[in-house]
């Protein structure tokens, strides 16, 4: 009898343990399945970016697929403060605004400048960094100013403000320039090296890296102050994320956290 009862007890506890384990497993399963359900997805934000823009965003081919850079650090830091996990996604620059519009990306950090044209279709945060534009050409070339681009073939990134800048030289300054638009900056740089393009217009902070890696190239800053290229975060129109992110961005600007990232990525001996 005693034995029987004990057996019963053991048996019951085994069953109980089994049930508990089963519950545990099903709990785990539930957790992992919510991982892809809407509830948890709310905490994951897809950051659209065009990872051809060191030190803003780039893929280090040697170390694999990971997208790194100033924009990635900034977005992740902002996300962390707001309880989001930010995942960068590489998209051609001209596809970034469409990606926001069709929901493929929740926010865009791509050294993107808030232009009046873009503001019509997406919302922007405050500016978090400002650079200027540079003309890149081969050493020994006599191209130094926008006027020197007359009669030349000039590469720009498709849909960038640099495309706008060179197109304006053609339309408004009536310069005779062959404007070549490519998706990816390294391809443009390659065309200059191979002699197919005479020059390119690229942001100075980004040019710096390409100049350091390609000693046959030189850059001249475009002195006209009106041609500044500010960077801001873009969101789908009326996204509630904008205010949240903007508030934290303001904090990070005030408390020096943005400055720290600027030094890390753009300072002397900057991270790569
Ligand atoms: N600032 C320029 C623009 O907004 C160029 C940005 C290019 N960014 C990139 N990740 N390739 O048009």
Image (cartoon, helix red, strand yellow):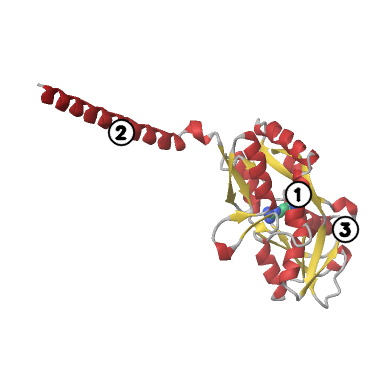
- The percent coordinates of residue 162 (x first, y second) are 77, 56
Query: Which residue is at the front of the view, 151 or 200?
Result: 200
Asked whether mark 3 lies closer than 8 Å to ligand 1, one says no
**Disc 3: CA contacts within 10 A as few (<14), some (14-19) or many (>=20):** few
- The percent coordinates of residue 265 (x first, y second) are 73, 56
Residue 234 figure quarter: top right
Identify the residue at horizontal 70%, vertical 54% (top origin).
56
User: Upstream in the sequence, badge 2 or badge 3?
Assistant: 2
Label 3: which secondary element: loop
Provide the residue designation for mark 2: 21
Q: Is residue 98 above or below residue 168?
A: above
Q: Is residue 20 above or below residue 162?
A: above
Query: Which residue is at the front of the view, 84 or 168?
Result: 84
Identify the residue at horizontal 14%, vertical 22% (top origin).
5
Q: State which mark lies toward you, 2 or 3.
A: 2
Query: Which residue is at the front of the view, 229 or 158?
Result: 229
Label 2: which secondary element: helix
Apparent side of residue 41 relative to residue 224 in the rendered image (left or right)? left
Provide the residue designation for mark 3: 173
Do the CB atoms of the residues marked 1 and 3 lie less than 8 Å apart? no
Residue 12 figure quarter: top left
Provide the residue designation for mark 1: 260
Tell me the quarter of the image containing the C terminus: bottom right
State the count of labels: 3
Q: Is residue 151 above or below residue 163?
A: below
User: Upstream in the sequence, badge 1 or badge 3?
Assistant: 3
Residue 239 figure quarter: top right
Separation of residues labelled 1 and 2 (CA atoms): 48 Å
- The percent coordinates of residue 130 (x first, y second) are 81, 50
Label 1: which secondary element: helix
């Amino acid at each position: 009898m005693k034995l029987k009862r004990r057996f019963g007890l053991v048996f019951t506890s085994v069953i109980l343990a089994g049930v508990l384990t089963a519950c545990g497993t099903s709990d785990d399963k539930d957790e992992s399945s919510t991982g892809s359900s809407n509830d948890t997805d709310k905490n994951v934000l897809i950051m659209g970016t065009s990872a051809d823009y060191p030190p803003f965003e780039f893929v280090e081919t040697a170390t694999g697929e990971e997208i790194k850079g100033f924009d990635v650090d900034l977005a992740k830091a902002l996300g962390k403060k707001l309880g989001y996990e930010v995942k960068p996604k590489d998209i051609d620059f001209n596809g970034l605004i469409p990606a926001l519009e069709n929901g493929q990306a929740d926010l865009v950090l791509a050294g993107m400048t808030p232009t009046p044209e873009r503001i019509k279709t997406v919302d922007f945060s405050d500016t978090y960094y400002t650079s200027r534009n540079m003309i890149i050409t081969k050493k020994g070339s006599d191209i130094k100013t926008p006027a020197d681009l007359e009669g030349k073939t000039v590469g720009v990134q498709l849909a960038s403000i640099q495309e706008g800048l060179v197109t304006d030289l053609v339309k408004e300054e009536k310069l005779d320039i062959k404007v070549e638009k490519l998706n990816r900056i390294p391809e443009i740089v390659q065309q200059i090296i191979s002699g197919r393009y005479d020059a390119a217009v690229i942001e100075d902070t980004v040019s710096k890296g390409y100049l350091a890696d390609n000693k046959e190239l030189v850059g001249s800053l475009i002195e006209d102050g009106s041609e500044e290229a500010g960077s801001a975060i873009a969101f789908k129109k009326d996204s509630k994320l904008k205010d949240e992110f903007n508030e934290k961005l303001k904090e990070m600007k005030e408390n020096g956290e943005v400055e720290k990232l600027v030094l890390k990525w753009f300072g002397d001996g900057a991270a790569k």
